[in-house]
Amino acid sequence: MAFNPVFCLKLSSWARALTPQTAETDAIRFLVGTQSLKYDNQIHIIDFDDENNIINKNVLLHQVGEIWHISTSPADRGVLATCYNKPSDSKVLTCAAVWRMPKELEPGSHESPDDSSSTAHSLELLCHLDDTAHGSTACVTWEPTGDGKKVISLADNHILLWDLQESSGQAVLASSASLEGKGQLKFTSGRWSPHHAGTQVATASDTTVRGWDTRSMSQIYCIENAHGQLVRDLDFNPNKQYYLASCGDDCKVKFWDTRNVTEPVKTLEEHSHWVWSIRYNHSHDQLVLTGSSDSRVILSNMVSISSEPFGHLVDDDDLSDQEERRPEEKSQEPPRDGVIATYEEHEDSVYAADWSSADPWLFASLSYDGRLVINRVPRALKYHILL
């Protein structure tokens, strides 16, 4: 089933990096990073006025290179990190840095930039995260429930934990670990768990997914051959502490219980090409968003493995009690898992799709041709979940 988008915006450059502004919970805001070899690259700040259905766009200059990944501080609305290409001798390295946007562009600012639609603003460099001895940086992930002072970067086969000090003006390498094994092992993506007091991180490298304890930088689980081909992205269920989702070049989306990783709990096979992005809804974890090189965004309902499989909030221990209840006490059959909606507004590979931090029913997707599409969860499903 296809639905009409809330809003479409076409940027003038290739793009593959998208993130909501995590610390902004009042206004709907997304950041998009461009990839241009001819012109200065930019970060587009996209503010969506839901009441009036209007987009307001501001531009930040990112002159250091093409943006491959972008992430925002969970605590400071003005701070973000980028991974970008930087030519070095005869090769190109992907570096990482932490930046601050101008005060007048922070959400809720009372200052109004003049002619904001056409004026490009400058980013303030706070610190670099790239010790070039560690190689190219694939991504930067922030401690999700912290004060914005801890980040992890994945560089080649190294996982690096940084402490941001002096108002994020200095990054101190606190600890690190390396992948061991044959061949050229490289991380492709990583995600910091919002559970376990912020002590667990999941990483993807080739076809393997690993869990790490940030206190000792040691592995706590390993899912070998999690996918038949390269694993592209990961996300933790925000409400179920042991549940992790992965996607990859085998066109599959898989859901794992990290206490028992021998088999996935569920597998989806709805995409026809590489799956680049997977995201749980922050409030309603049965809603799962995926983006793929098949140019489609798919919204799936994974209610059977959500925190509300019987229409009300349950924890993992409650599920074992279901069998012991008398038939008359059992709730009605839970809704079935499956595709809720397929969104086909894109004409190129969809490299990123993510939920708004301010509105749990709204999400954005980005394809390589620079098209940003904002969509909503179908109204009928929204009311079914709420009522």
Image (tube, rainbow, N blue to C red):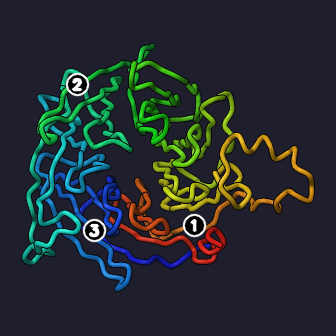
Instruction: State the CA–CA distance, disc 1 to disc 3.
Output: 23 Å
| Label disc, if present, on residue 342 of the rendered structure | 1
Q: Tell me the quarter of the image containing the C terminus.
A: bottom right
Residue at the outermost right position: 327
Horizontally, is 337 left or right of 48 in the view? right
Depth check: 327 or 363 in front? 327
Disc nearer the start of the sequence (2/1) = 2
Residue tagged 2: 173
User: Considering the numbered disc 2 on the image, is that residue within a helix, a strand or a loop?
Assistant: strand
Kind of residue sitting beneath label 3? Ile
User: Is disc 3 surrounded by few (<14), some (14 to 19) or many (20+) residues within 10 Å?
Assistant: many
Can residue 68 be seen by looking at this rendering? yes
Give the image quarter of residue 166.
top left
How far from the left and from the top, in percent, is residue 307?
64, 51
Residue tagged 3: 46
Which residue is drawn at the image coordinates 44% and 65% (left, top)?
A: 363
Does the CB distance between marks 2 and 3 fall below 8 Å?
A: no
Which residue is drawn at the image coordinates 32% and 39% (left, top)?
A: 139
Which residue is drawn at the image coordinates 28% and 71% (left, top)?
A: 47
How far from the left and from the top, in percent, is residue 193?
46, 39
Can residue 38 be seen by looking at this rendering? no
